[in-house]
Image (cartoon, rainbow, N blue to C red):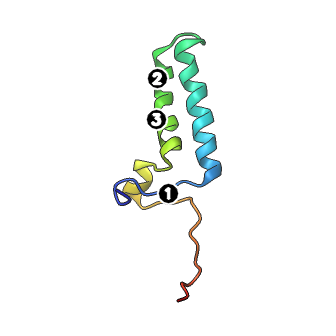
Amino acid sequence: MSKFLPNNEHPVERVARVVLGGGLLSLAFIGPHTPWGWLGLIPLATGLLGSCPLYTLFGISTCRVSHHPKTT
């Protein structure tokens, strides 16, 4: 499953996506009741999962990778 949904988002980016997604989704319920608010599900889901399908497709990753050599 890690190849299908690799963790490729930085924790700060994940928080920003969840906040943005929640804000957009609120437009469908308490804002001007526009159907465009449902687009907030995309950043909300990717932020909660920690994986962006477009990042995976293009080989992008904003999360930190530890470069510590393994010691035995």
What residue did someone put label 2 on?
38
Q: CA distance from mark 3 to mark 2?
A: 8 Å
Q: CA distance from mark 1 to mark 3?
A: 15 Å
* Label 3 Cα crowd, 10 Å radius (few <14 / some 14-19 / many 20+): some
Res. 63 image quadrant: bottom right
Disc 2 on helix, strand or loop?
Answer: helix
| 60 or 12, nearer to the observer | 12
Which residue is pictured at 49% across the width and 57% down the height? 8
Amino acid type of disc 1?
Asn
Residue at the spot 59% in from the left edge and 65% down from the top edge = 64
Above or below, 62 relative to 21: below
| Kind of residue at disc 3 | Ile
Residue 39, image x and y in percent?
47, 27
- 3D distance between C-alphas at marks 1 and 2: 24 Å
Q: Secondary structure at mark 3?
A: helix
Quarter occupied by the N terminus:
bottom left
Q: Earlier in the sequence, mark 1 or mark 3?
A: 1
| 1 and 2 marks in contact (CB < 8 Å) | no
Residue position marked by numbered label 3 in the rendering: 42
Residue placed under numbered mark 1 in the picture: 8
Q: Percent position (x, y) of residue 23?
A: 61, 26
Q: Residue at x 51, y 21 (%)?
A: 37
Mark 1, residues whose alpha carbon is within 10 Å: few (<14), some, or many (≥20)?
many
Mark sitting earlier along the chain (1/2): 1
Residue in view at x 51 percent, y 60 percent: 61
Looking at the picture, does residue 13 appear above or below residue 44? below
Using the image, determine if residue 63 lies above or below residue 46.
below
Residue found at the far front of this picture:
72
Residue at disc 1, secondary structure: loop
Q: For this view, does 54 lie left or right of residue 34?
A: left
Q: Amino acid at mark 2?
A: Trp
